[in-house]
Image (cartoon, rainbow, N blue to C red):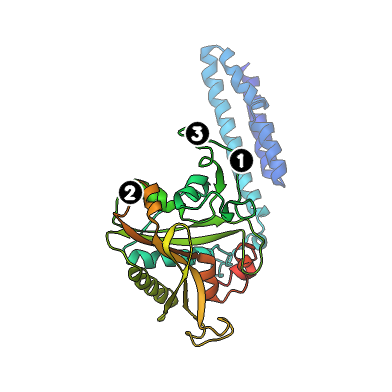
Amino acid sequence: METNTFDFLEKMERAGCTAFSEAKTLAEFRDLEVQFLGRKSELGLFLKSLALLPPEERHKVGKRANEAKRAITAASQSARARLSEASFDVKSEWIDVTDQPCSLPVGHLHILTTVENEIVDIFRSLGFDVADGPELETEFYNFDALNIPADHPARDMQDTFWIREDTRSSQDPQDHRSARLLLRTHTSPVQVRYMETHTPPFRIIVPGRIFRSEATDASHEHTFYQFESLFVDKSVSVGNFKYVAELFFSRFFGKRIGVRLRPSFFPFVEPGFEFDIACTVCDGKGCSSCHGTGWLEVGGAGMVHQSVFEAAGYERDRWSGFAWGFGTNRLAMMKYKIPDVRLFQSGDLRFLNQF
């Protein structure tokens, strides 16, 4: 019995070693591995059957079987190394580690984000904090709390994006008007929200996106960005506003910029002003950019109406403050000579990659 068994193992060892040494391809090599070293190979099945042999015979036969398996395994490893080296395509796998890597395009900040960051940095240096609020706003904060009458044209569908469903506040079910939702038409609602939770004195700025239901053209967009400032203290005056405005615009444009105030009406301020800055192209001398006037219209401003203070929970006539705002898009257009406001949201990389 042992003689036949040893002959079988000797034959299996020679056949396996010979087959691996004569293998020509990696595919042929993989088939030989299954044939001679796989779990269902003759040698594999033989090793499993050793448990059926008597103990005295199992030791001798098992030793010889393991010698045969080690020999075939060594031949397999040698064949793998030989065939792997022979199949390696040096030309296709060659890498020049000294070659310059290809430059991949990387993203960068949008021009409006860059301008907004610059504005924030200037105001922070003047002691202002940054405040934020929701873009989906209620009618109360967007209109009522800002002293805007119920019949004001700004509340019309032609000017405001109203949310279709008339959602009502669970806290005040009787006040149906204040619970209606809309996309905010300015950043001023943040003023009231901030005052409800803070006690003066304070100085804040409110950058953010706003929405207006209007036709678009080179100077008008339905979605754009605004920047608002609020300064509240005991004895704030128009002179304080004019000084801060001149200081800000001079730093933003990198040169001395004058500010002009023109009387105007806004429901949430009294008195109210339209404010212009000296033309950044001609320095106020008059050119085609400013239509020969020497001035460029920028935004609105004024002293905070006492009704707005009352809506925020403040005692009437105890505090004074100024509020003013301007379009971030417009300021970017003025600084970088951009002719069309629609370019900012066009997604045109030819425009965006300039900044």
Disc 1 element: helix
In 3D space, how far apart are the residues under numbered discs 2 and 1 (Cα atoms)? Answer: 92 Å
As drawn, 224 above or below 37: below
Residue 178: where, in percent of width, then height? 50, 42
Q: Crowding at label 2, few (<14), some or many (≥20) Cα neighbours within 10 Å?
A: some
Q: Is residue 132 visible?
A: no
Residue type, mark 2 in image: Tyr
Image quadrant in which the N terminus is located: top right
Disc 3 element: loop
Q: Are marks 2 and 1 in contact (CB under 8 Å)?
A: no
Residue type, mark 1 in image: Ala
Which residue, as the protein is rendered here, is positioned at the far left? 234
Q: Residue at x 30, y 56 (%)?
A: 319
Residue 304: where, in percent of width, then height? 39, 59
Which marked residue is nearer to the observer: mark 1 or mark 3?
3
Residue type, mark 3 in image: Gln
Q: Which residue is mark 1?
A: 75
Q: Residue at x 54, y 64 (%)?
A: 110
In 3D space, how far apart are the residues under numbered discs 1 and 3 (Cα atoms)? Answer: 90 Å
- Res. 285 mark: none
Residue 122 sits in quarter: bottom left
Image quadrant in which the C terminus is located: bottom right
Q: Could you tell which of marks 2 and 3 lies nearer the N-terminus?
A: 3
Q: Which residue is mark 3?
A: 174
Residues 325 and 13: in front is 325
Q: Residue at x 47, y 57 (%)?
A: 267
Q: Could you tell which of marks 1 and 3 lies nearer the N-terminus?
A: 1
Please state if 110 lies on the left or on the right of 213 as rendered.
Answer: left
Q: Could you tell which of marks 2 and 1 lies nearer the N-terminus?
A: 1
Q: Which residue is mark 2?
A: 314
Disc 2 element: loop
